[in-house]
């Protein structure tokens, strides 16, 4: 989740009122914006409505385990640092929490200075990650502009040069029709130039961000899928609602790029023979999924957050203010599920 301006907010999840009030006062004095809840259920409800860079939670809550808060954050792809408060005897639980994505832990009893140092470190970590994601969004925007520039140059320079070559070859053929074998060779060269012109046109269109919004997301994607299937032999089915309309060109361009990245990943790594792409609207959200029947994987592919292809997908979804979830079962395939606000009016500043 990208924030327009970073606010140092802390959520305290603690059922002991004395500890809860102590943490509230301590953090408020240090300038943090603090909210407190006494149960895991309250925490999950609040997290569904509000973003907190740092959460301090006990592992043993009256209704749920603190681990379930970690699971919720991971499922929603929320970039939050979680500090676990625990007793010395709960070392095994702490190790499990750290494996599940907790940032750090504090054992009871603790001093105010130790807690404040951990919170400050956690807050700085999230702040720097937010800055990195903001920079990543600008890089994506700049990349799309560069794609458009290259597309124009390919179309104007190479496209025109090939057209001149083709016309010149035809003129030579007409002029030297009486020379044995020459017309046939020229005809062959002209046909090859024609194929090259079509390929240049395809590359130019594929690079241009405006191409997607000009022809519409469904048509642009259908043409890309057609070429992809011919080259890879992977059968792709796509399902879109009637009268598909996007609020901004960024939405359809980024979803188009995401599909390109996902299909390229599938072709390179999955061993899949079939892919299904679904796009629907629900509760003012764009629900977008890409599923394959490939070999799948255990855990995250190529590391915790995935390889460069998946990283690019995550960055574009984050730039649109959305969430992403990757589900995979060995030998049964992988599904990427994405949610993007349909009423997103987000724009980038170069």
Image (tube, grey):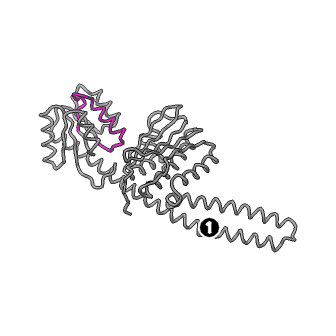
Q: Can you say whether 333 is above or below 203 in the image?
A: above
The residue labelled by disc 1 is 158
Q: Quadrant of the C terminus?
A: bottom left
User: Looking at the image, which residue sits at the far bottom?
Assistant: 175
Check if residue 284 falls in the magenta segment: no
Residue name at image x 26 percent, y 47 percent: 123
Q: Can you say whether 80 is above or below 199 in the image?
A: above
Residue name at image x 47 percent, y 60 percent: 144
Query: In screen coordinates, is 61 left or right of 301?
Result: left
Q: Can you say whether 182 is above or below 51 in the image?
A: below
List x then y, in percent, for residue 232: 62, 45
List x then y, in percent, for residue 348: 38, 60
Residue name at image x 30 percent, y 37 percent: 102
User: Looking at the image, which residue sits at the far front?
Assistant: 242
Residue range in magenta is 56-81
Check if residue 76 falls in the magenta segment: yes
Residue name at image x 60 percent, y 48 percent: 228
């Amino acid at each position: 989740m990208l924030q327009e301006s970073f606010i140092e907010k802390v959520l305290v999840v603690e059922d002991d009122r004395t500890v809860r009030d102590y943490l509230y006062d301590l953090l408020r004095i240090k300038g943090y914006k603090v909210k407190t809840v006494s149960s895991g259920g309250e925490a999950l409800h609040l997290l569904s409505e509000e973003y907190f860079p740092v959460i301090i939670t006990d592992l043993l809550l009256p209704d749920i385990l603190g681990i379930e808060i970690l699971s919720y954050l991971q499922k929603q792809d929320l970039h939050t640092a979680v500090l676990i408060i625990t007793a010395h005897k709960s070392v095994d639980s702490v190790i499990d929490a750290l494996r599940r994505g907790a940032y750090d832990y504090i054992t009871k009893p603790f001093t105010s200075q130790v807690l404040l140092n951990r919170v400050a470190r956690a807050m700085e970590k999230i702040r720097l990650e937010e800055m990195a994601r903001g920079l990543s969004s600008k890089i994506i925007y700049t990349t799309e502009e560069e794609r458009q520039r290259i597309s124009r140059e390919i179309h104007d320079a190479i496209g025109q040069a090939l057209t001149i070559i083709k016309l010149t070859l035809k003129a030579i053929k007409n002029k030297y029709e009486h020379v044995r074998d020459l017309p046939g060779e020229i005809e062959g060269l002209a046909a090859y130039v024609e194929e090259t012109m079509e390929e240049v046109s395809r590359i130019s269109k594929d690079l241009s961000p405006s191409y997607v919004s000009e022809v519409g997301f469904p048509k642009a994607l259908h043409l890309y899928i057609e070429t992809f299937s011919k080259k890879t032999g992977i059968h792709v089915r796509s399902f879109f609602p009637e009268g598909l309309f996007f609020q901004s060109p960024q939405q359809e361009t980024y979803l188009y790029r995401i599909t390109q990245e996902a299909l390229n990943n599938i072709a390179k790594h999955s061993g899949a023979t079939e892919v299904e792409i679904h796009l629907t609207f629900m509760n003012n959200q764009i629900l977008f999924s890409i599923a394959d029947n490939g070999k799948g994987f255990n855990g995250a592919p190529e590391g915790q957050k995935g390889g460069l292809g998946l990283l690019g997908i995550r960055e574009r979804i984050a730039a649109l203010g959305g969430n992403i979830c990757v589900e995979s079962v060995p030998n049964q395939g992988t599904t990427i599920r994405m949610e993007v606000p349909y009423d997103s009016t987000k724009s980038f500043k170069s």
